[in-house]
Amino acid sequence: MTLTFQGNQWSQLLQECTHKVQPELLSDKRDRTGIIPDWLGTGYKRVIILRGGLFVTLHRHQFKEDIIFLSSGLERTFFEFSFFMTARGEVNRQLYAAEQEVFLVNSTLQAARTVEFAGEPFCAIDIHLDKSTLASMVLEYEPDLSIDVRRMIMGEDDRPILQPLKITSAMQTLLQQIMQCPYQGLTRSLYLEAKSLELIALYIQGYRDNLEPLPRLRSDDLDSIHQAREILCQNLHAPPSIAELASQVGINTRKLKQGFRELFDTTVFGYLTQQRMAIACQLLQQQCSVAVTAAKVGYNSPTAFSGAFRRKFGIPPKAYQLSNGRGA
């Protein structure tokens, strides 16, 4: 069975359940925890309000049924730094798998249909900071920001999210400290405020360090990279090796790898997998069997394909097909 929630129905359900089982979790207006009812799954959503337009949301749950969340577009007063320890699901019919990744979410949200799958653990911490507060904090240091982060914070980028960064060991330590905060009252507030701002600082620094452009490629090198992409897309079933691909387009392997990272933000193999999985999702939605889909996107066996699909999206291809209501 699949359940659907829209608007504030989800928040109301958590509040009603918590009132019944642990009403004390709602007594502090600055630190409120909503419990997921037993019939639906396990876990909670906790919201901690700090100072200066800053608040933190802790998510940890696992559902017994597939859950669909329908949200309408809206303009929010804050930016959101979403740190996903583990999360798999579907957004607007596109599968996603976030493992140890952090996203900067815009203040303007588009309408979305989000699915969280049964049996998949979800663990994340969201740090929310008021738009004007964040803008004023970084205004003096604009030259130190990456272009994408600066444009989003200054309201010049309408993308819903920026591409993710991997959570570093330093970030992981801070996230664990937030999850396991031992303090109460003012001490807790100051402690969590400091940890949250440090996480935002590490994100901003990390985004600049990780996404600084590599030494520029020449225009003929860029043409070769685009040609290599076309060769991959035309040979998903039997792709050439990196050395063969570089030779075919007339550049060395170093430039080939650099070009894919610079132009497509992934490795050569990562791009190949992305294309295979994108086509696989389309074929599964069109009622192709798992075996036929595996063959069409270049896997030697349905088992190998199913393993790759599950590693990418967290569910087997058959489950994805069934969740879209088009069983083969």
Image (spheres, rainbow, N blue to C red):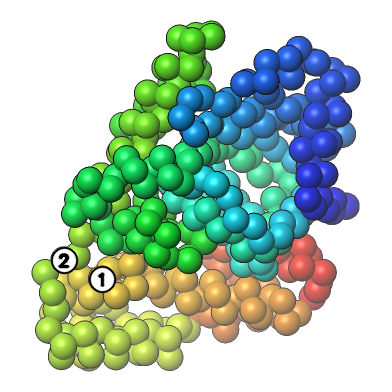
Q: Relative to residue 227, is residue 131 depicted above or below?
A: above
Horizontal arrangement in the rendering, residue 58 relative to residue 196 (left or right): right
Q: Mark 1 and 2 residues: CB-CB less than 8 Å, in contact?
A: yes
Is residue 179 or residue 224 the one in the foreground? 179
Horizontal arrangement in the rendering, residue 206 relative to residue 156 (left or right): left
Compare marks 1 and 2 and give the one earlier in the sequence: 2
Give the residue type that dot 2 points to.
Answer: Leu
| Mark sitting on residue 262 | 1
Give the residue type that dot 1 points to.
Answer: Glu
**Residue 256 sits in quarter:** bottom left
Q: Residues within 10 Å of mark 2 (few under 14, many from 20)?
A: few
**Residue 284 sits in quarter:** bottom right
Q: Residue visible at 75% across and 27% down?
A: 35
Q: Secondary structure at mark 2?
A: loop
Q: Which residue is mark 2?
A: 214
Q: Position of residue 139 (x, y in %)?
A: 28, 48
Q: Residue visible at 42% across and 65% down?
A: 157
Question: Is residue 306 at least partly visible in the picture?
Answer: no
Quadrant placement of the C terminus: bottom right
Q: Position of residue 171 (x, y in %)?
A: 36, 34
**Residue 22 sits in quarter:** top right
Horizontal arrangement in the rendering, residue 266 relative to residue 249 (left or right): right
Q: Residues within 10 Å of mark 1 (few under 14, many from 20)?
A: many
Q: Residue visible at 45% across and 70% down?
A: 273
Q: Residue visible at 71% across and 60% down?
A: 72
Mark 1 vs mark 2, CA separation in Å: 7 Å
Q: Position of residue 314 (x, y in %)?
A: 60, 53
Q: Secondary structure at mark 1?
A: helix
- What is the tally of numbered marks visible in this picture? 2
Horizontal arrangement in the rendering, residue 22 relative to residue 165 (left or right): right
